[in-house]
Image (spheres, grey):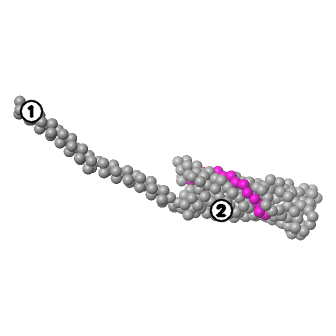
Amino acid sequence: MKTIAKKGKENGAWGRSRVSWKSALFAVLIVPAGSELAAQTEGSGAASVSAGKSPWFVEASVGLSFIPGGDILIDGVSYEAEYDNGQLFRGAVGRRLGRNWTTALEWYYRTNDAESFVSDSAVIGGGDLASTNLFLGLTYTVDERFNLLGFRPSLGFGVGLMQEVNLDLEGFGNEDFSDNWTFGWQWSVAVGRPIGRAGWLYVEGRAISGGEVDLESSTQDRAVTFDYDAWALLAGFRWSF
């Protein structure tokens, strides 16, 4: 009986020692490995944040400006205006707001040659319609999972001031008509894709409107009235700091 009891005690001690040995092995091998994995995961998250780009960026774009023909009232006489395709030059400073939103303060200049102004009794040939514009815009770009061949679409809207709207009429002895600080709005549709870690290349269609504008002559007491609507097709590049 003593032998059996002694063996039982030995077996119990051996069982406990095996349990302790397994616990020690687990503590030595498994726990440090898990801690190292957690540290790597936490470290990678911190690295991705620290390696992320600054929220600030600059943009530059250039393209074609289009103005649809339409009615224009020159010194009380109605004319049908026709415009040639022109140019638009744009620069902006902006900031990202989270993953999908950006806001930008932009300045751009657009100009279109006036082909002719035709009324029932007269034809005025030549001229130029131009404006300088300061706008604040907000743009939403879809998530990366919705990209097509690496391109992501975006939709933007903005409001601002046309610092100067200017119409030069060569047929009126180069008479100049202008107005300052006219309120306007715009919307845009674009597709873009990243270039490297800091670049963004895009093409954009844009509509710009100032409603009905009244331009005063710089030399005589007469005015020009028309609906200011313009379109643009741009290619641009963004650089994040």
Locate residue 81: give its quadrant.
bottom right
Where's residue 51, x and y in %?
48, 60
Where's residue 59, x and y in %?
62, 62
Residue 160 forms part of the magenta stretch: yes
Residue positioned 83% across, 54% down in the render? 212
Tell me if 239 is positioned left or right of 233 in this view.
Answer: left
Q: Is residue 8 above or below residue 130?
A: above
Residue position for label 2: 92
Of residues 159 and 33, the one drawn nearer to the viewer in this rendering: 33
Q: Quadrant of the N terminus?
A: top left
Residue position for label 1: 5
Q: How far apart are the two marked residues, 1 and 2, measured between alpha carbons?
A: 89 Å
Where's residue 9, x and y in %?
12, 36
Q: How many marks?
A: 2
Tell me if 117 is positioned left or right of 240 in this view.
Answer: right
Residue positioned 74% across, 54% down in the render? 185
Element at badge 2? Answer: strand
Q: Quadrant of the C terminus?
A: bottom right
Q: Earlier in the sequence, mark 1 or mark 2?
A: 1
Tell me if 81 is positioned left or right of 136 in this view.
Answer: right
- Amino acid, disc 2: Ala
- Whether residue 118 is visible to the viewer of this picture, yes or no, is no
Residue positioned 71% across, 58% down in the render? 135
Span of residues in magenta: 151-164
Tell me if 66 is positioned left or right of 14 in this view.
Answer: right
Query: What secondary structure is the magenta-colored segment mainly?
Result: strand
- Amino acid, disc 1: Ala
Residue 177 forms part of the magenta stretch: no
